[in-house]
C-alpha cells in the first residue's frame, strides 16, 4: 500500500465532506475526487466513517504539535496567546476540515465521531490548565468545566472567521485570552483590566 495514495484519499475526503456535507457524501464521490478505483479505497479504509475518524485523528495530532509547553522563565500570558493563535491559524489553513468539524449536522453518526474528537481536544485543554495550576499561573478551578467553556468560545469564534479574507490571528487570540483572564468587567475607577501591552 502507498502512503501517497492514502494521503490522496484523505485530502479528497476532506474536500468532499466540506462541499457536500458528511451525510450526503458517498465513497463514490471520494474515489472520483482522488482518482482511484473503489477497490483501492477499501485497501485503506472500511467506510467513510473510518476515513473521517482518520481526518480528526490527524487534527488532534497536529494540535498537540502546535501547543507549546509554557516556559515559566518567559511571559506565560504571551505564550498562552501564541498557543491559541497557532490553533486559529491551523483552522484557517484547513478551512474545509474546520467547517466539517464546526458546522453542526443532523447525522447522529457524525455527532458521535465529532463528539469523540472534541473530548480529546477538551482533554488537551484540561491538561494545559492543570499544568498552569501546578505552576501557579492559573487559579484553582473546575478544569473540565473551564476546558469546555474555552473550547466552546474557540469553536464559535473560529467558525465566524472562516469566511473572512484577512484575519489578525494574534489580535483574535489576545482577545480570547483577555476574556478568559479578565472577563469584560471595568472597575468603577475606569481603569481597564486589559492584558498589558507587552503581551
Image (cartoon, rainbow, N blue to C red):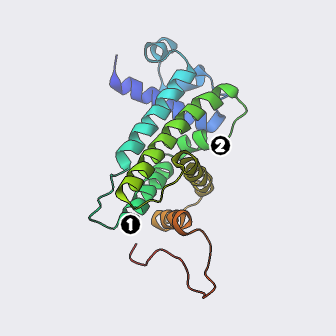
Looking at the picture, how far across and down is residue 22, in whole percent? 63, 30
Q: Position of residue 190 (x, y in %)?
A: 60, 87
Label 2 neighbour load within 10 Å: few <14, some 14-19, many 20+: few
Labelled disc at residue 78: 1
Mark 1 element type? helix
Q: CA distance from mark 1 to mark 2?
A: 30 Å
Instruction: Give the structural element (helix, strand or loop) at label 2.
Output: loop
Q: Is residue 171 visible from the viewing direction of this image?
A: yes
When the figure is inspected, residue 89 is found, relative to residue 118, above or below; the finding is below
Q: Residue at x 51, y 27 (%)?
A: 53
Residue 58 located left or right of residue 184: left
* Location of residue 72 (image quadrant): bottom left
Image position of 5 with respect to 96: above or below: above
Binning the other alpha carbons within 10 Å of mark 1 as few (below 14), some (14 to 19) or many (20 upward) gives some
Q: Along the line of sight, which residue is nearer the eye, 96 or 124?
A: 124
Which mark is on residue 103?
2
Q: Give the residue drawn at x 38%, y 43%.
A: 64
Q: Residue at x 58, y 20 (%)?
A: 27
Q: Is residue 52 left or right of 111 when viewed as pictured?
A: left
Quadrant of the frame with the N terminus: top left
Amino acid at each position: 500500500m502507498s502512503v501517497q495514495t492514502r494521503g490522496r484519499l484523505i485530502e479528497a475526503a476532506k474536500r468532499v465532506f466540506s462541499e457536500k456535507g458528511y451525510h450526503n457524501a458517498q465513497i463514490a464521490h471520494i474515489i472520483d475526487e482522488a482518482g482511484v478505483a473503489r477497490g483501492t479505497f477499501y485497501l485503506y479504509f472500511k467506510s467513510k466513517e473510518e476515513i473521517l475518524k482518520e481526518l480528526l485523528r490527524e487534527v488532534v495530532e497536529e494540535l498537540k504539535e502546535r501547543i507549546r509547553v509554557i516556559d515559566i522563565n518567559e511571559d506565560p500570558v504571551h505564550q498562552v496567546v501564541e498557543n491559541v493563535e497557532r490553533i486559529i491559524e491551523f483552522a484557517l489553513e484547513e478551512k474545509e476540515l474546520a467547517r466539517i468539524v464546526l458546522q453542526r449536522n443532523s447525522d447522529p453518526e457524525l455527532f458521535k465521531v465529532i463528539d469523540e474528537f472534541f473530548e480529546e481536544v477538551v482533554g488537551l485543554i484540561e491538561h494545559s490548565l492543570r499544568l498552569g495550576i501546578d505552576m501557579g499561573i492559573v487559579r484553582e478551578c473546575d478544569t473540565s468545566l473551564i476546558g469546555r467553556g474555552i473550547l466552546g468560545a474557540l469553536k464559535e469564534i473560529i467558525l465566524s472567521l472562516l469566511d473572512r479574507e484577512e484575519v489578525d490571528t494574534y489580535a483574535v487570540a489576545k482577545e480570547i485570552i483577555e476574556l478568559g483572564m479578565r472577563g469584560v468587567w471595568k472597575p468603577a475607577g475606569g481603569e481597564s483590566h486589559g492584558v498589558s501591552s507587552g503581551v
